[in-house]
């Protein structure tokens, strides 16, 4: 199941930089390279003599680390074209500079981080027609994989501003579902009943995720070794599975009397 919440709007250049730095956090978006089924040249990082990849790609960006600055340069060109040489509109804080989109995937879809990233990239390329700058990073730090996407609102061809209208999010979700389905992700039809069911399931998942995170934070601070971590996890009714490529967690007892 794929979920895209309403994007967060970025109005100020300072927040623009913060958003880019957040999504590029290597602690959340770097994994060991073990072969890939997607045709994306991810940046390679060597750590402890191990080859790893940074799950980042972009459109129209030369240097990921200053993606916000490159997007701002395009906006400067747009401002000068409009005759706004003083950049009053750009610096007003009223203009939407970019959208921060989060595309989340259910663990039940059994997708790899590379596949999730490619779904996000294909989604954005179709959604924008390749005419807008964006940077996408796949985060693996939670119990569900998710893409963070920073999308500039300036068209690189016309220098005109993107208009986020009533049906824009609906169209984005439809494109996302189409590309996710190609990889076998479960797509829920948008009926009223299913919308409520989907929302209820997602809310329960978030409750579980929050509770698991609270217990993990405690364990990481209080444990002195892996064995100590495992023993304390049992006492906190938290099952930890280290057997797969990614560590998995689940609660051994229900919340509020039911799972």
Image (tube, grey):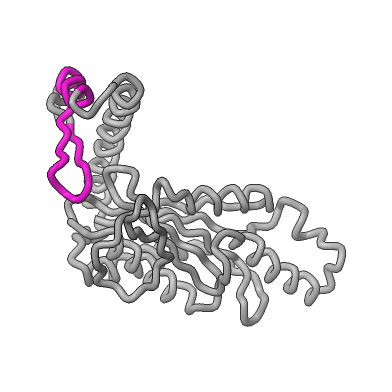
Residue 145: image x %, image y %? 30, 52
Q: Can you give x and y, in whole percent of width and height, for residue 7 in the image?
A: 48, 53
Establish if 224 lies above or below 103: above
Residue 3: tell me if it is visible: no
Q: Residue at position x 28%, y 22% from top?
A: 223
Left/right of residue 54 with respect to residue 166 in the rendered view? left
Give the percent coordinates (x, y) of residue 227.
Answer: 18, 26
Q: Quadrant of residue 57?
A: bottom left
Q: Is residue 100 visible?
A: yes
Q: At 32% from the left edge and 67% from the top edge, which residue is drawn?
A: 119
Q: Is residue 37 magenta?
A: no
* Residue 145 falls left or right of residue 108: right
Which stretch is magenta?
228-250
Quarter of the figure with residue 141: top left
Q: Residue at x 38, y 56 (%)?
A: 138
The one nearer the camera, 188 or 80, is: 80
For residue 138, above or below residue 159? above
């Amino acid at each position: 199941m794929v979920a895209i919440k309403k994007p967060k709007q970025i109005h100020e250049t300072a927040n623009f930089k913060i958003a880019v730095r957040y999504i590029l956090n290597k602690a959340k978006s770097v994994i060991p390279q073990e072969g890939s089924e997607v045709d994306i040249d991810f940046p390679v990082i060597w750590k402890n003599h191990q080859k790893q990849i940074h799950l980042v790609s972009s459109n129209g960006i030369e240097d990921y680390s200053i993606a916000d600055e490159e997007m701002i340069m395009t906006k400067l060109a747009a401002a000068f074209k409009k005759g706004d040489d003083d950049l009053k509109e750009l610096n007003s804080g009223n203009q939407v500079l970019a959208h921060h989109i989060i595309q989340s995937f259910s663990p039940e879809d059994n997708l790899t981080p590379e596949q999730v990233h490619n779904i996000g990239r294909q989604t954005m390329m179709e959604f924008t027609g390749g005419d807008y700058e964006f940077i996408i990073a796949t985060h693996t730090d939670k119990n569900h994989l998710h893409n963070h996407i920073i999308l500039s609102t300036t068209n690189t061809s016309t220098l005109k501003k993107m208009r986020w209208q009533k049906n824009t999010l609906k169209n984005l979700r439809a494109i996302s579902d189409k590309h996710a389905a190609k990889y076998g992700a479960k797509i829920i039809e948008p009926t009223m009943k299913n919308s409520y069911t989907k929302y209820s399931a997602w809310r329960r998942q978030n409750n579980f995720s929050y509770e698991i995170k609270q217990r993990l934070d405690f364990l990481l601070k209080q444990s002195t070794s892996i064995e100590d971590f495992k023993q304390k996890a049992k006492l906190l009714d938290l099952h930890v599975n280290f057997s797969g490529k990614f560590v998995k967690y689940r609660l051994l007892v229900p919340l509020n009397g039911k799972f």
